[in-house]
Image (cartoon, rainbow, N blue to C red):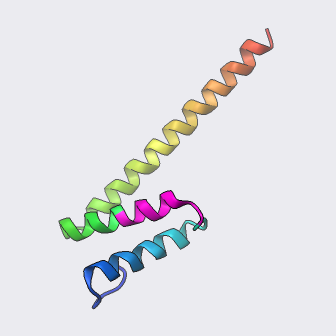
Amino acid sequence: MVVRGLSGRVAILTSDIAFTVMHLNPSEIDHVWFGLMCGVAYANSGKLLAPIAMHVLNNCIVIYVQLLAATVVTESFNVASC
């Protein structure tokens, strides 16, 4: 946790706020929920590896979806130009 000496819930919320702010778009609710899930995963496991693995998996999924969307858009333009 980022904050030591606080209760578990306060520490998770404080870390979540820091996670959201670090991603530079606090208006997106998904960052808030993801930060909370990572905080809970850390609190339950006691290991930093759990939220790190969640973050890596999330980033891989986002990259895959973006590449898939780019491929679909590119193919759409290729069909339209025929």
Question: In the visual, does 71 lie left or right of 58?
Answer: right
Please provide percent x and percent y for residue 62: 50, 44
Q: Main secondary structure of the magenta part?
A: helix
The structure residue drawn at horizontal position 19% and vertical position 70%, both measured from the top left corner, is 46
Rendering quarter of residue 48: bottom left
From which residue to which does the magenta span run? 27-36
Task: Please determine whether, in this image, residue 58 is positioned above or below residue 12.
Answer: above
Rendering quarter of residue 54: bottom left
The structure residue drawn at horizontal position 42% and vertical position 49%, both measured from the top left corner, is 58
The structure residue drawn at horizontal position 49% and vertical position 37%, both measured from the top left corner, is 64
Regarding residue 7, the answer to whether it shows in the image is yes
Please provide percent x and percent y for residue 35: 41, 65
Asked if residue 80 is among those painted magenta in the image, a careful observer would answer no
Outermost residue on the right side: it is 81
Outermost residue on the left side: it is 45
Please provide percent x and percent y for residue 74: 69, 25
Please provide percent x and percent y for residue 81: 80, 14
Asked if residue 33 is among those painted magenta in the image, a careful observer would answer yes
Question: In the visual, does 70 lie left or right of 18?
Answer: right
Task: Please determine whether, in this image, residue 17 is positioned above or below residue 77.
Answer: below
The structure residue drawn at horizontal position 41% and vertical position 59%, both measured from the top left corner, is 34
Rendering quarter of residue 9: bottom left
Task: Please determine whether, in this image, residue 39 is positioned above or below residue 80.
Answer: below
Question: In the visual, does 60 lie left or right of 66?
Answer: left
Counting every numbered tag in the picture gives 0
Image quadrant where one finds the N terminus: bottom left
Question: In the visual, does 19 lie left or right of 77?
Answer: left
